[in-house]
Image (tube, grey):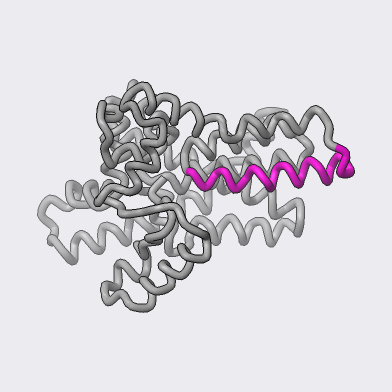
C-alpha cells in the first residue's frame, strides 16, 4: 500500500517538477550564453542561480550568524539549517541548496494538488500544480531561495488543518515560521479552521497553535544570547542594507505600488520590487 501511494505521488508530481526545472534551467542557460558566450557557461549559470539573497542563506549555512548585529540576522534560520544538514554528506552548500529546493518543490506541488482536489476536481488540482511549476516566478523554486520550502510548509499546514489533524498542521506552520516571518499569517487561519471544526467551542486541540510562533521566539532568544539584542531580526531589517521598518500593511502596499509604477529598471519592476515598509527577505 505504501509503495502504491508513493508511486501515485511521483507519477503526479514528477512531470510538472521536471518540466519546471528543465524550463528554468534552459532559460538560465540561454541568458548566460547571450550575456557571457559559451566560455565558462556552467560557472556563470551556477552564479546566476545562487545570487541575491541566496548568497546570505549560503553564508549562514556555512559559517552561521555573526557574533554582532549584521544584515545576516534578517534571515531566519530554517532554510540555512536545511542546507547545512544536506551539505554534511554532499560537501557542497550550493548543490545541497538545490537538492533542498528540489525536494521542497516536490512536496509543495503535492500539497497544493491535494488542497485544490479537496475543493474542486482532479483536473483543477492538476492545473494548479502545473501552474505553480511553470509560473514566471517559479525560477525561485529552483534557486537557493525560501519560496519552495515555505510553500511546501504552508500548503502542508493548510492541508492537515482541513483534514482535522491540528498537531500536524501546527508543526508544518511552525516550520513555515522558521523559514519566513510571513508564516505567522498561518496562525489565524489555523485557529479559525479549528474553531469551525469544533463548532466554535474551543477544545484542548486548539493549544497546538501555540507551536506556530515558537521558532521565531527561539530565534529571538538565540540572538539575545549571541548578539545581546533579542530583536536583532528587526534591528537588522533597519540597517542600510535593507532600510525596512514595521508599519501598517497599507503603507507597505503603497510603497510597493509606487516602486512598481515609478521604477525604470525592468528587473526591479518585474521581480524585485522592494516593499520598503515591511520586513521582507525572511
The residue lying toward the viewer, choosing from 144 and 186, is: 186
Q: Main secondary structure of the magenta part?
A: helix
The reply to whether the magenta stretch includes residue 27 is: no
Numbered disc total: 0
Q: Is residue 46 above or below residue 218?
A: below
Question: Residue 20: x, y in percent?
Answer: 45, 55
Q: Residue at x 76, y 56 (%)?
A: 119
Question: Residue 164: x, y in percent?
Answer: 79, 37
Q: Residue at x 26, y 58 (%)?
A: 29
For residue 228, side relative to residue 250 (left or right): left
The residue lying toward the viewer, choosing from 146 and 244, is: 244
The residue stretch that appears in magenta? 181-201
Question: Residue 161: x, y in percent?
Answer: 73, 40
The reply to whether the magenta stretch includes residue 195 is: yes
Question: Residue 109: x, y in percent?
Answer: 57, 48
Instruction: State which quarter of the image contains the N terminus.
Output: top right
The residue lying toward the viewer, choosing from 199 and 223, is: 223
Amino acid at each position: 500500500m505504501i509503495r502504491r501511494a508513493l508511486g501515485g505521488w511521483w507519477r503526479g508530481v514528477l512531470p510538472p517538477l521536471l518540466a519546471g526545472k528543465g524550463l528554468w534551467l534552459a532559460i538560465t542557460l540561454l541568458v548566460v550564453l547571450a550575456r557571457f558566450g559559451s566560455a565558462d557557461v556552467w560557472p556563470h549559470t551556477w552564479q546566476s542561480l545562487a545570487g541575491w539573497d541566496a548568497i546570505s542563506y549560503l553564508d549562514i549555512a556555512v559559517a552561521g550568524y555573526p557574533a554582532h548585529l549584521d544584515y545576516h540576522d534578517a534571515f531566519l534560520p530554517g532554510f540555512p539549517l536545511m542546507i547545512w544538514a544536506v551539505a554534511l554528506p554532499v560537501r557542497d552548500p550550493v548543490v545541497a541548496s538545490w537538492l533542498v529546493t528540489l525536494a521542497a518543490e516536490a512536496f509543495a506541488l503535492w500539497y497544493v494538488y491535494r488542497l485544490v482536489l479537496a475543493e474542486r476536481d482532479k483536473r483543477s488540482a492538476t492545473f494548479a500544480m502545473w501552474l505553480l511549476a511553470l509560473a514566471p516566478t517559479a525560477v525561485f523554486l529552483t534557486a537557493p531561495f525560501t519560496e519552495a520550502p515555505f510553500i511546501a510548509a504552508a500548503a502542508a499546514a493548510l492541508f492537515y488543518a482541513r483534514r482535522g489533524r491540528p498537531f500536524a498542521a501546527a508543526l508544518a506552520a511552525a516550520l513555515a515560521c522558521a523559514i519566513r516571518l510571513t508564516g505567522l499569517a498561518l496562525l489565524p487561519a489555523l485557529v479559525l479552521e479549528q474553531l469551525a471544526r469544533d463548532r466554535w467551542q474551543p477544545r484542548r486541540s486548539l493549544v497546538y497553535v501555540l507551536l506556530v510562533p515558537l521558532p521565531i521566539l527561539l530565534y529571538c532568544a538565540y540572538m539575545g544570547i549571541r548578539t545581546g539584542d533579542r530583536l536583532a531580526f528587526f534591528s537588522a531589517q533597519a540597517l542600510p542594507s535593507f532600510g525596512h521598518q514595521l508599519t501598517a500593511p497599507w503603507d507597505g502596499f503603497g510603497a510597493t505600488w509606487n516602486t512598481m509604477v515609478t521604477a525604470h529598471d525592468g528587473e526591479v519592476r518585474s521581480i524585485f520590487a522592494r516593499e520598503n515598509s515591511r520586513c521582507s527577505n525572511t
